Image: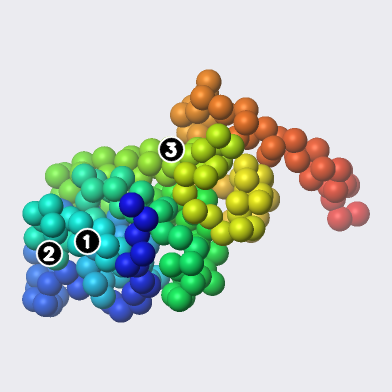
Amino acid sequence: TPVSGARLSTQPQHHSPSGPAHRIMASVEEKLGEVLERVFRVSLTDGGASSGGALYLGELVQELVLEGAEPPLLVTADNLERILFARLSISTAALSGTALALDPEAAPLRWLLRSYARANAEARKTLSRDKEYAEALGAALAACFELCVSYCGLLLNPAMADMFPQPPAAATRGALQLYDEFTGPDGLPPGFIEEFAKRFDGEGLGDMIGPLIGELPKMMRGISPLGAF
């Protein structure tokens, strides 16, 4: 079900009013929730956000509460795919009244690729002596990578092009969005294309990366073997 009750939140994240002492005692689930919010820039807590701002998925929260969940809700590995589905289902019109409408990550593919990159960054920077947390974080980030790859495939596969709403410019580019990201200022995240190729080998991979490969000769023709000379 498309989520229309979404809005951008830029206030500091608070899962509890208990202050700094509570953060020190934060559970593994709470710490993981904060990481996943940063990775995907989403929140299930009204007013909660990472430092970069997160999209509050209000209708999804209502659904979860009706199913028996008790707020404040956390982003977890268990509800992560549902959160991605809700975020991807938000129409361009629903985003038009938020700051995210002008954000490059309003385009679903860009959001998934940047989320993959943020998951990479979290994996590099996180060092913990807490074995339980370290293992849980590793599993959660592995799920992030897997979901980003899988849903990028849904967006890029011509046969699934209408599954999620996309801005008109992105929809027009189709699978060539992968080329746009490859040649853009951020490039593709390290490890992404390898995982993408493994995941979709024999499942329409040629249709998804063929347009990118077809454009590469044009890019190479603009590069002199002498460089700037």
Q: Residues within 10 Å of mark 2 (few under 14, many from 20)?
A: few
Residue under circle 1? 61
Residue 105: image location, x then y, percent: 50, 61
Q: Earlier in the sequence, mark 1 or mark 2?
A: 1
Residue at the extreme right of the image, as rendered: 229
Give the SS element for disc 3: helix
**Front one among 97 and 79:** 97
Which residue is rendered at x = 44% and y = 42% of the image? 151
Residue that badge 3 annotates: 150
Where in the figure is residue 98, as x and y percent of width and height?
Answer: 44, 75
- In the image, taking residue 82 as reference, residue 53 lies left or right, namely right
Q: Which mark's residue is nearer the viewer, 3 or 1?
A: 1
Nearer to me, 75 or 101: 101
Q: Neighbour class for label 3 at 10 Å: few (<14), some, many (≥20)?
A: some
Mark 3 and mark 1 lie on one chain; the one further toward the N terminus is: 1
Disc 2 marks which residue?
Answer: 71
What residue is at 52 percent from the left and 51 percent from the top? 109
| Position above or below: 42 against 122 | below
Q: Residue drawn at (45%, 68%), measured in percent from left and top?
A: 95
Q: Are marks 1 and 2 in contact (CB under 8 Å)?
A: yes
Mark 3 vs mark 2: which is more N-terminal?
A: 2
Question: Disc 3 marks which amino acid?
Answer: Ser
**Label 1: few (<14), some or many (≥20) within 10 Å?**
many
Instruction: Assign a secondary structure to mark 1.
Output: helix
Tell me: 1 left or right of 173: left
Residue 97 visible, this orientation: yes
Residue 31 in the image: state x and y as whole percent: 20, 58
